[in-house]
């Protein structure tokens, strides 16, 4: 009896095991009871409950995560280039490159 929880809310009656893996990474379902919060888009795996919506639309945890990902994708990582724009090599190479083979 898997059912998706539509929005963030607080349980007002009942209890269930909720799969929150898409949000928390926890592989095992978490038991949720009256008074506890549930996160929208997670899965009710067993039991039943009634809940009151606390966050909808752009305010839900899932929407906040999506917004942060979009912002991160739009930003660039700091560059390792020197002020002249050329990358600095941390290794020292001899003037004879590639290395000469030893006769020993």
Image (cartoon, rainbow, N blue to C red):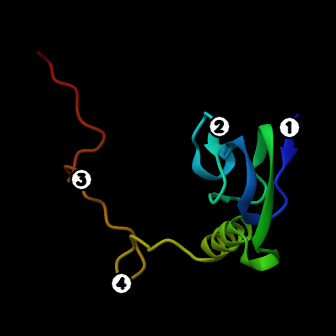
Classed neighbour count for the residue bearing mark 4: other residues with Cα under 10 Å, few (<14), some (14–19), many (≥20): few
Q: Nearer the viewer, mark 1 or mark 4?
A: 1
Residue positioned most to the top: 104
Q: Is residue 78 above or below residue 98?
A: below
Pick whichever of labels 2 and 4 is earlier in the sequence: 2
Horizontal and vertical percent for residue 65?
66, 67
Horizontal and vertical percent for residue 35?
63, 60
Residue name at image x 55 percent, y 74 percent: 76
Pick whichever of labels 1 and 4 is earlier in the sequence: 1
Which residue lies under the disc numbered 1?
2
| Real-space Cα separation, disc 3 to disc 1, in angstroms | 56 Å
| Real-space Cα separation, disc 2 to disc 3, in angstroms | 50 Å
For label 4, the SS is loop
Looking at the image, residue 27 sits to the left or right of residue 4; the answer is: left
Pick whichever of labels 3 and 1 is earlier in the sequence: 1
Q: Is residue 61 above or below residue 71?
A: above
Classed neighbour count for the residue bearing mark 3: other residues with Cα under 10 Å, few (<14), some (14–19), many (≥20): few
Pick whichever of labels 2 and 3 is earlier in the sequence: 2
Looking at the image, residue 87 sits to the left or right of residue 48; the answer is: left
């Amino acid at each position: 009896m898997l059912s998706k929880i539509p929005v963030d809310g607080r349980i007002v009656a009942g209890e269930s095991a909720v799969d929150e893996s898409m949000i928390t990474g926890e592989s095992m379902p978490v038991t949720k009871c009256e008074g506890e919060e549930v996160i929208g888009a997670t899965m009710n795996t067993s039991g039943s409950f009634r809940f009151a919506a606390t966050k909808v639309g752009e305010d839900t945890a899932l929407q906040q995560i999506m917004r942060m990902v979009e912002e991160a994708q739009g930003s660039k990582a700091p560059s390792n280039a020197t002020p002249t724009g050329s990358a600095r090599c941390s290794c020292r190479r001899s003037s004879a490159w590639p290395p000469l083979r030893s006769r020993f």
